[in-house]
Image (cartoon, coloured by chain):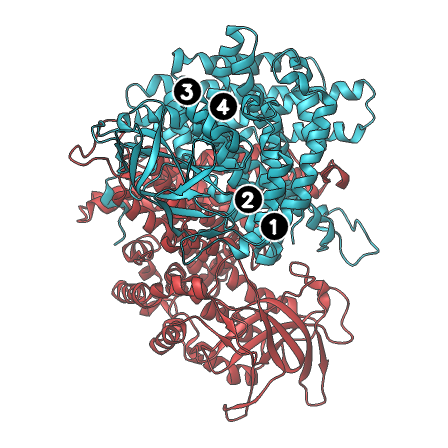
Chain colours: A red, B cyan
Amino acid sequence: MPVYKAPTRDTRFVINEVLRLEDYAHLQGFDMATPDMVDTVVDECGKFCSEVIAPLNRIGDSQGCTRNADGSVTTPDGFKQGFAQFQESGWGTLSSPVEYGGQGLPHVLGFTMEEYLCSANQAFAMYPGLTNGAISAIVSKATPELQAKYLPNMVSNKWLGTMNLTEPHCGTDLGLLRTRAVPQADGTYLVTGTKIFISAGDHDLTENIIHLVLAKTPDAPDSSKGISLFIVPKFLVNDDGSLGERNAVSCGAIEHKMGIHGNATCVMNYDGARGWLVGEENKGLAAMFIMMNAARLGVGIQGLGQAEAAYQNAVIYAQERRQGRALTGPAEPNEKADPLFVHPDVRRMLMDAKAFTEGMRAFALWGGLLVELAHKAETEEARQQADDLIGLITPVIKGYGTDKGFETAVNMQQIWGGHGYIAENGMEQFVRDARIAMIYEGANGVQAMDLVGRKLPANMGRSVQAFFALVDGECAAASADAQLAPVAEKLAKANGELKAATMWLMQNAMANPNNAGAGAHHYMHIMGIVSLGLMWLRMAKVSAAALAGGASEKAFYEAKIVTARYFAERFTPDAGALRRKLEAGSATMMKLPVEAFATA
Amino acid sequence: MPVYKAPTRDTRFVINEVLRLEDYAHLQGFDMATPDMVDTVVDECGKFCSEVIAPLNRIGDSQGCTRNADGSVTTPDGFKQGFAQFQESGWGTLSSPVEYGGQGLPHVLGFTMEEYLCSANQAFAMYPGLTNGAISAIVSKATPELQAKYLPNMVSNKWLGTMNLTEPHCGTDLGLLRTRAVPQADGTYLVTGTKIFISAGDHDLTENIIHLVLAKTPDAPDSSKGISLFIVPKFLVNDDGSLGERNAVSCGAIEHKMGIHGNATCVMNYDGARGWLVGEENKGLAAMFIMMNAARLGVGIQGLGQAEAAYQNAVIYAQERRQGRALTGPAEPNEKADPLFVHPDVRRMLMDAKAFTEGMRAFALWGGLLVELAHKAETEEARQQADDLIGLITPVIKGYGTDKGFETAVNMQQIWGGHGYIAENGMEQFVRDARIAMIYEGANGVQAMDLVGRKLPANMGRSVQAFFALVDGECAAASADAQLAPVAEKLAKANGELKAATMWLMQNAMANPNNAGAGAHHYMHIMGIVSLGLMWLRMAKVSAAALAGGASEKAFYEAKIVTARYFAERFTPDAGALRRKLEAGSATMMKLPVEAFATA
């Protein structure tokens, strides 16, 4: 059975030493996040996830969820008890708003909890995980009455939330949706329709479930401009907060999926269910995007979470499994064979994973800091800069993070050889679970188009220009340091590829927007490489300073510098290849007619 | 449920027009393979696989194999009947030796059957598939008596064969194996030990199963130089060919795996089972490699097979599923949305798949031709050249073919969005089934080391020099043709990267063999790119000539030229990035101590 130990030292390094959270202590919420407090939260989070939730991961996969004859849904053995502990200990409330009972700590801590929980058990993590997006939408758009009625119990995870977007015929293109919401005299709506792929759609973890549902009112425009968002609780909530009658919403079926078996992915049937409008009619897409942006960052973190868990188990196996001899001669001559660890091709995969997971952790937590600074930074200018950056990198955290997270899980499975293909060992579950993150909350091709089609051109390219300047500035500052220069040099080169690719898009996408679409996925990956490269430069810089200052954990900081160099050597070369592909444009790609793809 | 239609037109293009099999009609076996004959065999093969075997693929996955209380193994519903049809119609005998009842047709036809069967149902294909390797070993190494006793029934697929190499503690490093074979007075051996991961280890498809088992005799050296190969039949075979008593070999358990559920992957227990030596004592590794080389080519074809099947279903979905609008404006304004096919990012994935599958098909079938020419070409020189080339490209067909085959299956699943994650739709099965091919018959890292450590330096680099010259020659010949020049130019550049990478290895691997190990996987992929690039150049050349000659299937040949250009634009740039990674060497990769990988 796979094991998981939360990478707390690495998280503390990022939060305290790289992001230096204490430098923001003058901002609301940050004052509580002293290094000591961070250390305690991170360690306790890690302990809880490793000890209580991780042991439920295999059983969740093998048992799955059950829809009972009466339509109720039962989660796998142990999930109910695990969730009760999670809820009671308040782990879901770390970064939730204080006014509704949350702890109001910086998002970097909430993100850390999301990572650990996902490494321990992604299917489990999704139950509370989707609630965060639902909370964001209600906080931003709902009336004070609705907020008062739902938020305290959602924030405390006494109730969980869901996101109901997809229908059988539409996912990405929500303008096509058919679920109807008919206004009633009392101001409520009756919601009717079928939603599919609803994660945590029904379960036995909480007494109530608050569904956020996209639907169209009778006179709504027949496009994405005619979508409204509704709160549809599983049980109606009385004015005194007690639960009333069961609403007309039910789970019609549980999907059989490739992975995340422990999460109930439901077909949800709404048969005139009572709903309450969130925000204005026909403005549901904006509300949905609030929910979605939070969820996208969370999904990027899932990519990291699965990669980390798979990596840890590959590291253990690479030490325990003996096969063959080191190319340079027996490493352990007294044994009949050397551990896998001596083989360069195994080390390549481990170093790739190490460079990705540690770099991605810094990237995601930087994103968590930016989310906060966009609201809380002191000046309007600083808030705008943070908002620009987080808007730009959100699709990269999601798209690059999950593409590479899956790839990492696959490589870690590869280290296990044939044993990695066997269910009991758990390596193949990481791969199956990681796979979904590339698809949901906007498939990665959609993320790429969000980046290239919306985020790049916004405000005349202000965000991406700021990103270029940030990278160039840090590279220039590092170029005089002999330890950092090789890292900075390769990062600057990759940033040059990103700039060239951006320029090419600007010059060619106007004439033919397919040129943007044809290169979007490549572009997202170049930006992912540059982003992680920037993180590695920062981590190397902090580590070099720590070593120069005589830090006691010498091996830890030295490993950071070596891994930064590895990233520079083995990740940045792809930026050039991706730019060349992007610059090939759409002409050849789009040339063939549909018949040319048919099999004869 | 996924569909499959054998790509017969494309196969015929490769065999008749690109490889031009009829040019070899003066060689033994080729005389029968006239274009008409090829067309008939290919079409009938395709029909059988599409109509009889493909419909068993989903049920095989969902039902799996059963080990009954008495230790016998039952295959999924329909497999027994499907196999009976397969066996009766002689599809397994296409390229088997005539002297044992085979049809003696060129391997390109046997390979075609393997591809189609694997696309239709990989788990099913593995039952007869492994028999081919077993036959090769017996043909090469066994005594005439053993050949006479076993080959006719194995060639006819009345009996199937297995390969028993792996043990719980060893897979790649066979020198560690513990299974013992004790010689008896009558010249037989008693074999005792446990083998794991034995594909098709037991089943109900045939009355007998012929296991080829690696074991050590009592006085054998304690290394890979002490391995011997044995025939251990499930039922002993009497001198008159009738079945005798049950041998002391049994299936101890069936593994629960990520995929290929329809194939019984068995733990096999040998408890003093009667065995017959194949070849000489302690020379089993050489015999094993004969079996293995055949199997490796077959596994490369599995990568192609899964990619092709996934691709076909993605093409259908991309036409049927409507979501969003073309970036250039509505393609079908009368519909509420355009098909996925209009989106460049979807087309990118389809074109990637098309360029890979068609290129890989040509590459694998070229390999099939070389296997034959290595034995049958007229001159010693020509035989040597073919043998050099097939030795060189075998690990590339296996390693590159399965890495890219899996990647393609993942991308095709991505086109299906959330529906690709749902079991019923079958896309996720392609991914799970394709995954094993990167692992078994030598994990792809082992293939890479075979290429770099054994095939490159052999005969002072004669093979790879011949490969370079071949590519350069064909590029030069094409450079004057305006249609082919852009393809040839990018291929020549990729070949330049391959040459540079080879040179770097020659200069740096001697000083430190870890430099070879650190770059081996990258090197294998560069060679894969150049190999498929060469195939695309050949296919473009043939197509241009066909068009110039007024061929009637204009669209078919034009698509080949467009796809060749796409390959040049979007695959070859990776060669440069891979070379840069390879040239980074092993210093940084191998620098960190094992403790640096532990989680704290």
Does residue A480 appear left or right of residue A468 in this picture? left
Q: Position of residue A552 (x, y in %)?
A: 17, 49
Q: Earlier in the sequence, mark 4 or mark 3?
A: 4
Q: Earlier in the sequence, mark 4 or mark 1?
A: 1
Marks 4, 1 in one chain: yes
| Residues at circles 4 and 2 in contact by the CB criterion of under 8 Å | no
Nearest the viewer among A172 and A223 is A172
Cα–Cα span, label 4 and label 1: 33 Å
Disc sitting over residue B455 in the figure: 3
The extreme left residue here reads A334
Q: Position of residue B5 (x, y in %)?
A: 69, 42
Front tag of 3 and 1: 1
Indicate the secondary structure of the residue bearing disc 2.
Answer: helix
Which residue is rendered at x = 41% and y = 64% of the image? A107
Does residue B312 appear left or right of residue B219 in this picture? right
Disc sitting over residue B124 in the figure: 2
